[in-house]
Image (spheres, rainbow, N blue to C red):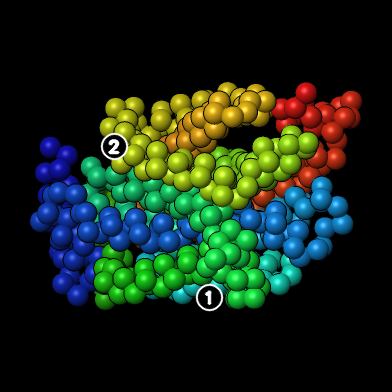
Amino acid sequence: MAKNREALLKKEVWEYDESCPGCKIDHLKESNPGIPFKLLFYVWIVVLCAALPISSLFPFLYFMIRDFHIAKREEDIGFYAGYVGSSFMFGRALTSVIWGMVADRYGRKPVITAGLIALIIFNTLFGLSTNVWMALSTRFLLGSFCGILGPMRAYASEVCRKEYQALGMSIISTAWGIGLVIGPALGGFLAQPAEKFPHIFSKESLFGRFPYFLPCLLISTFALGVSVLCYWLPETLHIHKENKEQDELYAWEVAAYGCDQQSLLKNWPLMSSIIVYCVFQLHDMAYAEIFSLWAISPSEYGGLSYSTADVGEVLAMSGLGLLLFQLFLYPPLERILGPVMVSRIGAVLTVPLLSSYPLIAMLSGVGLLLLINCASLLKNVLCVSITTGLFLLQNRAVTQQQRGAANGISMSAMSFFKAVGPAGGGSLFSWALKRQNDSFLPALNVLGKE
């Protein structure tokens, strides 16, 4: 009944314009009621590409800062690592609203293409960094010019019929989560190749002189291929010549989806979901950096004494499990429980899970390997489940004309919180390492040592 009502509203309220790319997408959705696999593949590959460089530096950031020789003591490395890690998010916080407005005005495709080009340039330059200021500036510029995720979230909701929007958002969350896991795995496996693979890379080669360039180059090369693929990416924004047609389109969206075009800051369903989203992203970004720093820290400081390759293996296993969960388990869970309940359950389970990490650090051998992999997998599953539900709530709260700007506000606010995450987390971790035997919050107890 709801489907028939939606189709009837379309026919009664406005007519398709064959020259409008958004109308072509709507016609495709109406004539093909199935899942748009091809379009969702575009969404998946672009979001994966955008996510890869965000946290790929964390497994080797400790060693990169050490090689810059800016930290006077080993305990100070986490302080500088936090600021390099947060510079990307700080740049994105300043520009996401602007990119969202551009996407609403000129289309999703131009913003996505520009973001991929920026990723290729600045991620490559980051791998060639020779000092901490170059690393900070290239990461900041990468965040400022890579405004991909906001428009892609709007894009995913626009290429899917309403009954498949949960799947579309799940695809974004899956690709994003996998990117945030595979990125560090690549960074862990491929950093310092002259030391790990001396029979392939000599210390006098380019990769020997720039030991953190290889993972950045691989990600940039992948981004180059995706940017070429985006030539065939269809636009979804409705671009009509007459304002009357735009008004008719808006009237249909209000009738079909029950959302009104009002000031975004006064849209409580949107703003409340953004606030919750920001809190969880702050937590997730701080976890992403602290986990890698903690895992590679020496055992005398309460760490696991892992190598970058060990961290990469843990994160790779998490990515595989996350992919299976999001593709096969999340969509039916969302249909049964709804996005709000799934997010609530994920939030509640995260608390005892993270509280168990100090206990896990007391283990060794197979027990440590098994539990740290399970905990990392479960943590990523819960985080992506929360994020997917909040994506759905945000995109259903606004019309298409506001969707890019709404996602831009969400990205700016989230990026600000994510910028605080690495800086605060790195500083807190560095502070903890200096308090090994203090009477108040001694780090040995906090990090799980006795």
Q: Position of residue 378 (x, y in %)?
A: 48, 32
Query: Residue 133 versus residue 394: which sits nearer the camera?
Result: 133
Residue 57 in view of the camera:
yes
Q: Quadrant of the N terminus?
A: top left
Q: State the SS at label 2.
A: helix
Residue 104: percent from left, percent from top: 40, 66
Q: Position of residue 89 (x, y in %)?
A: 60, 57
How would you rate the neighbour count of disc 2 (Cα within 10 Å): few for under 14, some for 14-19, many for 20 or more? few
* Above/below status of 213 relative to 373: below
Amino acid residing under circle 1: Ile
Residue 141 in view, yes or no? no
In this view of the protein, which residue sits in the foreground, 70 or 113?
Answer: 70
* Residue displayed at 51% across by 45% down: 313
**275 or 180: nearer the eye?**
180
Q: Give the quadrant of residue 322.
A: top left
SS category of the residue bearing label 1: helix
Find residue 328 and name its label: 2
Mark 1 and mark 2 lie on one chain; the one further toward the N terminus is 1
Figure quadrant of residue 430: top right
The numbered dot on residue 445 is none
Quarter occupied by the C terminus: top right
What residue does disc 1 label?
A: 121
The amino acid beneath tag 2 is Phe
The location of residue 3, given as percent across then percent down, is 15, 43
